[in-house]
Amino acid sequence: MSTSRTSVSGTTLSRRRFLQAGTAGAALLGLSACGGGDDAAGGGRKVVLAASTDQRELLRKPLAQFQAAHGVTVEYRTMPADTGAYFDQIRTQFQAGSDDIDVIAGDVSWPAQLAAHGWLADLTPRLAPAARAAFLPATIAANTYRGKLYGVPWFNDAGFLYYRKDLLEKAGYGGPPETWQELQEMALKVKADTKILNGYVFQGARYEGGTVNGTEFIRSSGGDVLRNGKVVIGEPAAVRGLQIARGLVASGASPASVAEFKEDESAGSFVGGKAVFLRSWGYLYSVVSDKTQSKLSRSQVGVTELPVAQQGLPHVNVGGGWNLFLNRESRRKDLAWSLITYLAAEPQQRIWATEGSLMPTLTGLYGDAEVLGTMPVLGRARTVVPHTTTPPISPYYADMSLAMAKHFNASLRGAEPPEQAAAALASELQKIVDHG
Ligand code: GLC
């Protein structure tokens, strides 16, 4: 994936920031050295993995290899692709004290929420310091709650702007937009010139992805949701971010339906050749070149950073990523740990990167020629991801996220003026923080 910009030079600000404010191969991972756990209670040579339906295909072969190597059966519990729906399901299981699932492949904001209830096994003694040091520090921090490690980083995510290089060139533009205003103008011009259906598509639905996108609009305007534990979403810069998002819809640069779009709808529009710009995650790069899903070729598509509200503001995106947790009630902890270390180990991280366009969590792979060669999107991410800082995490992120998803969506639809949405959130988030 190429871009007319030389590099992605901004900062990936993960949701871990909110959280704070409110608040290698198996051997490489030190597997054998740090056993711990206890399978004595039995449960057979079987291990149960919960993971999203989205990841099933990519995991198929590596899981088959793990099964053959260990003489075990891995049962795949297919979870919803929507991270919020998945979280609800897994929380219900945990609330019931279930030992049914051993390993949970879960989202970046989950560790604190699950660990605060005592539902996750403490992995601190299992992951040796040397193995831990191989991971991007931010990804380890994201899995750390009150000084203990509750997850092993599986893959990393960051938000990128994908754009139709061919259409921008035809319209006379020398490169992708730097500001939201430029993006809006380009989207409207290309729409008018080519009759393409959509300008900019992103994830505006009322769900976790909507929270992520809304936060990006806010941060790229110089605002934030929380700063040093204080709710600052009512400040003018944050309101400006919500106004920009609403302006895209009101101007026609984004379709009204973007308020219903999640990852699949927005990506579908773009790879179907029906949109000029798309905000999506790194994995989308592998979808672009998949002829069964995409009408585009890689040469038509560029990838760069998300725009900012005005020149001079730092580029930001809200990072994501997935991690591997161990159920504290699991009766097969050693086996489960083998699966976790296998999935997070370097050979498998190469597969996630080269076949799934999923960004590694092992620092070393960001300088790896093979990985970079097959996943040029990493070249853009290389300077961003390793510098992500990760503060402590909040157990009440879920409530905050639900409130944001609701008001961001209402503002996007025009049902609530941006100022009102920000003011409502300022008070609702404050209550959550106060009573957290
Ligand atoms: C991606 C990210 C995840 C985020 C989700 C939002 O899966 O990896 O962190 O929560 O998108 O839809």
Image (spheres, rainbow, N blue to C red):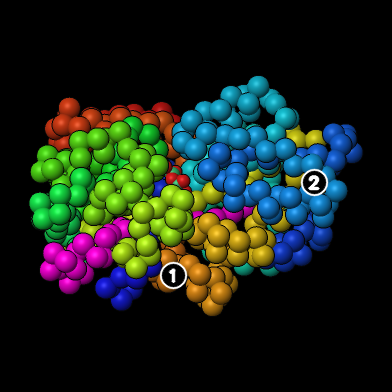
Question: Label 2, on which residue?
Answer: 335
Please tell me in which quadrant of the rendered image residue 111 appears: top right
Taking the spot 21% from the left edge, 46% from the top edge, the residue there is 198
Element at label 2: helix
What type is the residue that disc 2 sits on? Leu
Query: Where is residue 78 shown, x and y percent of the image?
Result: 61, 35
Indicate the quadrant of ligand 1 in the picture. top left
Q: Nearer the viewer, residue 68 or 300?
A: 300
Span colored in magenta: 146-175
Asked if residue 21 is among those painted magenta in the image, a careful observer would answer: no
Taking the spot 89% from the left edge, 38% from the top edge, the residue there is 40
Q: State whether residue 261 is above or below residue 288.
A: above
Query: Where is residue 181 shown, x and y percent of the image?
Result: 13, 56
Query: Where is residue 180 shown, x and y percent of the image?
Result: 17, 55
What type is the residue that disc 1 sits on? Pro
Q: Is residue 325 left or right of residue 239?
A: right
Let me know if residue 338 appears in the view: no
Q: CA distance from mark 1 to mark 2?
A: 35 Å
Taking the spot 27% from the left edge, 73% from the top edge, the residue there is 4
Q: Nearer the viewer, residue 122 or 368?
A: 368
Q: Which mark is residue 376?
A: 1
